[in-house]
Amino acid sequence: MHVFVTGASGWIGSHTVDDLLAAGHTVSGLARSDASATALEAKGVAVVRGGLDDLDVLAGAAAAADGVLHLANKHDWSDPVGTNAAERAAVEALAGALVGTDRPLVVASGVAGLAQGRPSTEADANPFVGPDTMRGGSENRGFDFVDQGVRAIAARFSPTTHGTGDHGFIAEIVAAARRSGVSGYIGDGTNSWAAVHVTDAARVVRLGLEQAPAGTRVHAVAETAIPTRQIAEAIGAGLGLPVTSIDPADADAHFGFIARFFGMEMSATSEATRALLGWEPTGPGLLEDIAAGAYSEPRVA
Ligand SMILES: NC(=O)c1ccc[n+]([C@@H]2O[C@H](COP(=O)([O-])OP(=O)(O)OC[C@H]3O[C@@H](n4cnc5c(N)ncnc54)[C@H](OP(=O)(O)O)[C@@H]3O)[C@@H](O)[C@H]2O)c1
């Protein structure tokens, strides 16, 4: 099928585009800069020039596609309101263009805040509804269009979708360790994160696009619960730095914006996704990836 991908130049998006092309799909991708456009063209992706706020561009490209993957996000941690508003508006524009077509729209999401005291599952409805909630309530906003003939699917990513070249959350935690000279975890470090290698995540997205029924939540989760203390220990071992607990009161100063996520419980399972899609992760685990040097190079911004 012909797939329009927002965020095609991003971390998960670029791996997903590779997976889509390898599976025989054709791809058009949103690019907001010459650099992103050039990278996409080099792969044989048709470039759609524009940004997330160009809602007409998003709608036009979605209408011309057989399916849509929404993987772009402004990720402006200094402006969560603006980031969430753009996310919600983009989902509305993409879904609106697909009304009555039964075509798939995969919306990126996460596993934060879905369950209390246990790993989240695909059965856990997303509690974030409305523009003022996490991610602008975009997962549920996408599902609003199921009754209007859109095959909306949520792709919930582990908080670390890891691998060599990742500039996301683990890279941010590694950067804090380099900056401070210690590899920290918050409090007792018993809160856990789910994890998935980026190539496995890309395959979940593609399989979900191809197969998942309307209203499905798929979990890109390979490892259910890695204590954050173990993550800090792996980072410390890799960088040759001491590992220490950071008092929650000092976490913002030590880690920056990532403190709010590194202190959260974000464990999750993927049994239903594996059963539905026949997906089995094959990439390295997070601690293995860190030990193998996936985060050994200082991050390029
Ligand atoms: N990575 C994770 O572990 C993780 C975990 C949970 C959820 N997620 C979600 O999964 C999705 C993909 O994440 P990611 O890690 O691949 O993110 P990423 O590497 O930061 O990529 C973001 C993409 O969005 C594009 N973008 C940003 N601002 C834009 C704008 N104003 N207009 C148009 N495009 C814009 C970027 O374009 P440029 O390349 O031109 O900058 C890039 O292609 C996001 O929704 C993210 O929140 C990711």
Image (cartoon, helix red, strand yellow):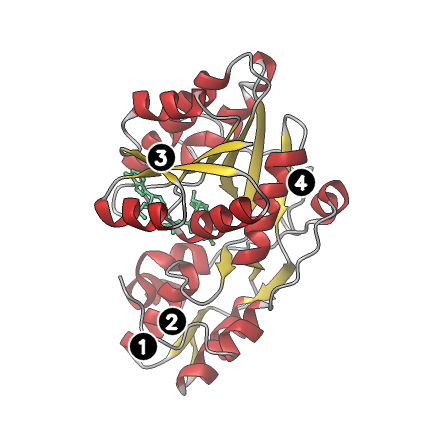
Place of residue 141 in the rendered image (x, y in percent of width and height, measured from the top left): 49, 24
SS type, badge 3: helix
The residue tagged 1 is 178
SS type, badge 1: helix
Q: Is residue 95 visible?
A: yes
Residue type, numbered disc 2: Val
* Position of 146 relative to 251 (above/below): above
* Position of 190 relative to 46 (above/below): below
Residue type, numbered disc 3: Asn
SS type, badge 4: loop
Q: Is residue 114 visible?
A: no
- Which is nearer the N-term, disc 4 or disc 1? 4
Query: Which circle marks residue 122 in the picture?
Result: 4
Please tell me which residue is depicted at 56% across the width and 43% down the height of the picture. 156
Between residues 186 and 296, which one lies in front from this camera angle?
A: 296
Kindly report the distance in space between the C-alpha atoms of the residues bearing marks 1 and 2.
Answer: 6 Å
- Which is nearer the N-term, disc 3 or disc 2? 3
Kindly report the distance in space between the C-alpha atoms of the residues bearing marks 3 and 4.
Answer: 23 Å
Question: Residue 79 appears in which quarter of the rendering?
Answer: top left
Place of residue 147 in the rendered image (x, y in percent of width and height, measured from the top left): 60, 14
Whether residues under marks 3 and 1 lie with C-beta atoms below 8 angstroms apart, the answer is: no
The residue tagged 2 is 174
Mark 2 lies within 8 Å of ligand 1 (Cβ measured): no
Tally of numbered discs: 4
- Which is nearer the N-term, disc 2 or disc 4? 4
Residue type, numbered disc 1: Arg
Between residues 257 and 75, which one lies in front from this camera angle?
A: 75
Kindly report the distance in space between the C-alpha atoms of the residues bearing marks 3 and 1.
Answer: 30 Å
Whether residues under marks 1 and 2 lie with C-beta atoms below 8 angstroms apart, the answer is: yes
10 Å neighbourhood of mark 1: few (<14), some, or many (≥20)?
A: some
